[in-house]
Image: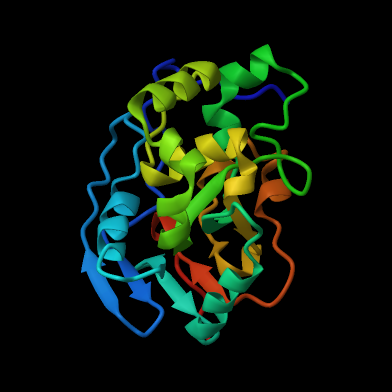
Amino acid sequence: MADVKPKDTHFSSPGPRSHPAESLCVGEHGLVTEEAPKRTASSDPLPSREKECVCAGRRQIERIIQLDLDLKYKTNIRELFEEFDHFLQGAVIGIAREMQPVYRHTFWQFRRENPQTKVGEPPPDGLPGFNSGVMLLNLEAMRQSQLYNQLLEPDMVRQLTEKYHFKGHLGDQDFFTMIGMEHPELFHVLHCTWNRQLCSWWREHGYSDVFDQYFRCEGQVRIYHGNCNTPIPED
């Protein structure tokens, strides 16, 4: 199918937000900090939540897990910490793929200009973008990574947004998705069962014929994510 072109080429959100107003940061030794990130509909892709957690990292916290509140855990969270052991050299963040074609939609202009691109395509071979409902942040690696810190610079953000014609609406998730298109080596991709997203808004808004290619997730679910206020299955 032809991708659905937004009515406003500056792209304001056509659908529900994927995140609630709050998240948790869980430290390696059980430390939990609550925060209320500044998630606005701004096109500024700089990740406010990530920057707040990096500030926490300056208090000798080297690795944290950042979690949305609309989650249901089916396993011990300690098992998620073990994913840090699988980070390849250069990776600074663990994060799961987005499970809807939202970035197929958002990158519509870049995709039209580059018809062979993998940007916005479904897994396993495509680049569907990321969902930041469950994230592993290696704060020490983030501080040490010259590449990652270069990508935080406003001029570099501007270059990438212009290259991809990108105007997002999901804050840190958009930022990580955009830099992941350019530098996938910065990310350890979590299996979908660690962030089994349940929102299906895009199925009814122009992408029914490709939706299941993004939404499919095989394996025993370890964390359910009730994004866009989707009910989570009962035990």
Q: Measured from the top left, where is residue 56 in percent x and y? A: 26, 64
Foreground of the two, 49 or 233: 49
Number of residue marks: 0
Q: Is residue 226 visible?
A: yes
* Quarter occupied by the N terminus: top right
For residue 63, above or below residue 32? above
Q: Looking at this view, is 123 or 63 the one in front?
A: 63
Measured as percent of width and height from the top left, residue 57 is found at: 31, 64
Q: Is residue 90 left or right of residue 35?
A: right
Q: Is residue 137 left or right of residue 129?
A: left
Residue sitting farthest toward the top: 113
Above or below, comparing residue 147 to residue 24 in the picture = above
Q: How are the colours assigned in the image?
A: rainbow
Residue visible at 58% across and 42% down? 129
Q: In the image shown, does 147 or 8 lie closer to the viewer?
A: 147
x, y (%) of residue 37?
24, 53
Q: Position of residue 133 (x, y in %)?
A: 44, 59
In the picture shown, does residue 154 fall above or below 235? above
Residue 81, above or below 115: below
